[in-house]
Amino acid sequence: MSATGSDPAEPEPRDEELAGLRRRVAELEAEAAARGHREPEATGRGHREHHRVRTFFATLLVVLASVLALLSVVSVWAADTITDTDRFVATLSPLAKNPEVQDGVSNRITNLALDQIDIDSVVKQLQQAASSSNLPPQTAALLSKLNGPIESGLKSVVGTVVDKVVSSDQFATVWNNALRKAHAAFVKALTGKGGGAVKLTNDEVQIDVGPAVAQVKDQLVAQGFPAASKIPTVNTSFTVYKSSSLNKLKNYFRLLQIIGNWMPVITILVAAAGVYLAHKRRRALIGTAIGFAVAMLVLGVALAVFRSFFIDQLPPDVNAGAAAATYDALVKFLRITTRMVGALAVLVALGAFLNGPTSPAVWIRAACSSGIGAIRTVADSAGFRAGPVDRFTARHKRWIGIAILLIASVIFIIWDHPTGLVVFWFAFVIVIAFAIREFFAPGPGLVHREEAAVDPAGPRPA
């Protein structure tokens, strides 16, 4: 027997056994493949279900944050208007120069002055003067029938003097001083606490214009009208708002005042939780910013609609023009804050979009990089040398961008009552800062992007 040969006595495997083994192996491989397909499919379903749950709660938090953003703006405005004396005076100070308010105050003071002047006494004084001047008896008798014309003339004289007083700088000073001294009293008008020149009486918000009456009295006497000296020192009130629902508004206002500056913090935390929970956080951030912008748009429309409703519900005895001017003055800073938050939300949404991986965002970034790179090429050709600044910027480019955003955020937070224009200039400065960063560390421009798109391996060196 050969060492390498086969034992002739060993049986050869039959074809049926080989076919059975092959079938068994095929069955086992098919089962293994089926299990392999089923497990990823089950895993995929679990991931999709998990993502749906996260998306649902993230969307819920984003919507809640948008609603809270609207309430935050209103609560901060309410707290500032009540607690900040300078803001309170700045809010109502322009009313002293408003023509509608001046007309209302002028009519109120004129009627008060005439009520304090005895027309019959003035006519008797004229009759006595006529008798002592040896005028004909018919003339003296005629004077006794001139009560109406004399009253009309007095009203014209007094009205002219009052208009001069109310439109003067002295009245504006009196108005502002009264506002500053009456800050605690305005708190009473909306919270029921305090006292002073601004008071709440029978669901009316009133401002005492007694000092202006004193000025009118002095000027009438100075112009040779001694009867005005009999006008007593009075505290006359000018109604700027009247509504049967004022007590309800007071309750809502107290709630907003209690919430105060905490509401924005809660809003930011809820929005941050929604973005963090979302599966696609950049998209969630853009959605949150858009939600804030929509909330500010709704608030702006609501302020305009409520203004019309407010004026339509005024009682007939209230000067509608003065009430409208008062409403506009009170909500002035609320409108400014609404525009500011809306502009900031749009800026955040735009920034998040441009920093994303979408084709338009990538193209815009590449186009800007190409433009700045061209400027840098021209500067280098002209002999510009940045030295170690280039290397430092290129090495820490990402952190420099984060630092720019952090510094801008801190400055914006500590800015006192920013406006929409402030937001615009912040955005302008941030763009300039990033452009300077790109100047010292240019990124791939449009040419490199196009080459990479043609050759997935990237641009080949020359």
Image (cartoon, helix red, strand yellow):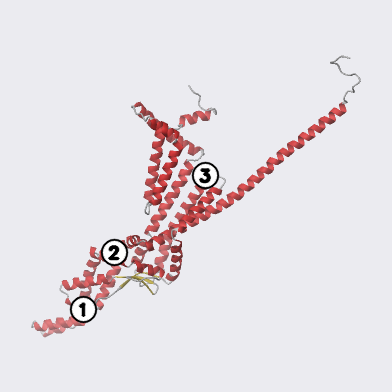
Mark 3 or 1, closer to the camera = 3
Which corner quadrant holds the N terminus?
top right
Q: Residue furthest top?
A: 2
In front of the other: 130 or 387: 387
Residue 85 placement (x, y as % from top left) = 34, 62
Residue 410 placement (x, y as % from top left) = 41, 48
Q: Earlier in the sequence, mark 1 or mark 2?
A: 2
What residue is shown with label 2? 176
Residues tagged 1 and 2 counted as in contact (Cβ below 8 A): no
Q: Which mark is residue 230?
A: 1
Q: Residue at x 35, y 64 (%)?
A: 326
What residue is shown with label 3? 282
Q: CA distance from mark 2 to mark 3?
A: 49 Å
Amino acid carrying label 2: it is Asn
Specify the quadrant of the image occupied by residue 25.
top right
Q: Residues within 10 Å of mark 1 (few under 14, many from 20)?
A: few
Specify the quadrant of the image occupied by residue 148.
bottom left
Specify the quadrant of the image occupied by residue 436.
top left
Residues tagged 2 and 3 counted as in contact (Cβ below 8 A): no
Q: Residue at x 39, y 34 (%)?
A: 439
Q: Earlier in the sequence, mark 2 or mark 3?
A: 2
Q: CA distance from mark 3 to mark 1?
A: 75 Å
